[in-house]
Image (spheres, rainbow, N blue to C red):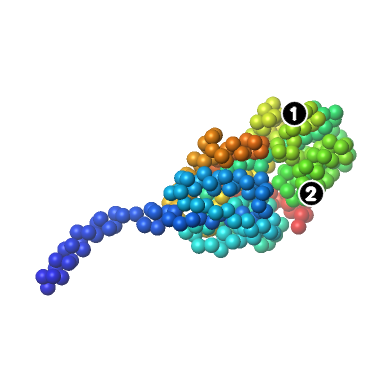
Amino acid sequence: MKRFTRFLAVLTSALPFALSQPAPAQDTYPSKPITMIIGWSAGAQADVLLRLLAQGMSKELNDQPIVVVNKPGAAGLLGLEAVKQAKPDGYTLGFSVSSNYLLAPFLNKEAAGMLEASTQIACFFDYQFGLVVRSDAPWKTWNEFRDYAKRNPGKVNYATSGIGTTQHIIFERIAEKEGIKWTHIAYKGGNETIQGLVGGHIDAAIQGPGDTVSFLREGRLRMLMSLNDTRWEAAPNVPTILESGYDFSAFSKACIHGPKGLPEPIRAKLEAAAEKVIKDPNSAYAEKARSLQVAAIYMGGREYTKAIEDRVEGFGKIIATLGLK
């Protein structure tokens, strides 16, 4: 009896200390390598930047390796599905873009519910899009281009790198709002689109800095509007779509995420590590982003989730209007 009493006293005295200790799994995270799955091929721009971000984050996370694994297929859906099925312990993360949540669910039933099945961690770069024309084109401003298109239904054409892309959807939203009828031409990629414009085969194109900046600097192309929320660093005098009077924009960001149910302490630790790397102008990630003419940005996971939720209805309506499948 005395032994039991002494044991009970020791147990009771130790209980407050035990209860005050943090959960070991979260407190020591990460204690082993992390896998980061990207549903795109190795060597692509997103893959290169993701690997540099992962290297930087690794240094902030107990020097645990973050291994990037390519799982291309189904427009990135295979990679998203692999993360969705993973255990929410912080050791399997993934790469996603805004279109996976804003466009894909309306075009592919397999992509439905992907936002709800994820835990968003941080965004690390913006896909920028700008409307460009040849330097000898008659339009010097967006207003001139818009007014000409309104006065000449069906006469103006523009090109993007595919049907159902963010830039295609945004430009058709403009057409719906303005009552414009123009023709969309889909190319296979950004380079082909710009070559078609420079060669005089199309009137205008919507592409990013990587495909257009050199032509802008050479004076061969003129940019009329940024379709993003912010102006381009390479074209600081060109207004954004918001500044041009519209209440929507080409919201397209590259982000990292985890499965649904990822514990908040782990999510917050990953977010903080990503933020430090992204905001460090001397990091290998930031330097590479600059060399690729990519807008390195930071947006926290919760803010990003809210931004997607606020925009998804508008994108869904225009996709239905266009009858895209």
Q: Quadrant of the N terminus?
A: bottom left
Q: Which residue is mark 2?
A: 188
Most distant residue in the left direction: 2
Query: Does residue 51 appear anywhere in the picture?
Result: yes
Q: Name the residue at 56% across, 39% down.
A: 284
* Label 2 SS: loop
Q: Quadrant of the C terminus?
A: bottom right
Q: Residue 231: which quarter of the image?
A: top right
Q: Amino acid at mark 2?
A: Lys
Q: Residue 22: which quarter of the image?
A: bottom left
Q: Position of residue 97 (x, y in %)?
A: 63, 49
Q: Position of residue 164 (x, y in %)?
A: 74, 50
Q: Choose between 325 and 163: the one closer to the eye.
A: 163
Most distant residue in the bottom direction: 1
**Above or below, comparing residue 133 to residue 258 in the picture:** above
- Whether residue 205 sits left or right of residue 117 in the image: it is right
- Circle 2 crowding by C-alpha within 10 Å: few under 14, some 14–19, many from 20: few
- Circle 1 crowding by C-alpha within 10 Å: few under 14, some 14–19, many from 20: few
Q: Choose between 208 and 242: the one closer to the eye.
A: 208
Q: Which residue is mark 1?
A: 217
Q: Name the residue at 74% across, 28% down.
A: 217
The disc placed on residue 173 is none
Q: What is the distance, in whole Å, between disc 1 and disc 2 at their CAs?
A: 24 Å
Q: Amino acid at mark 1?
A: Arg
**Above or below, comparing residue 95 to residue 229 in the picture:** below
**Above or below, comparing residue 32 to residue 213 in the picture:** below
Q: Position of residue 29 (x, y in %)?
A: 42, 54
Q: Name the residue at 77% across, 49% down.
A: 162
- Whether residue 156 sits left or right of residue 242 in the image: it is right
Q: Position of residue 145 (x, y in %)?
A: 81, 32
Q: Are marks 1 and 2 in contact (CB under 8 Å)?
A: no
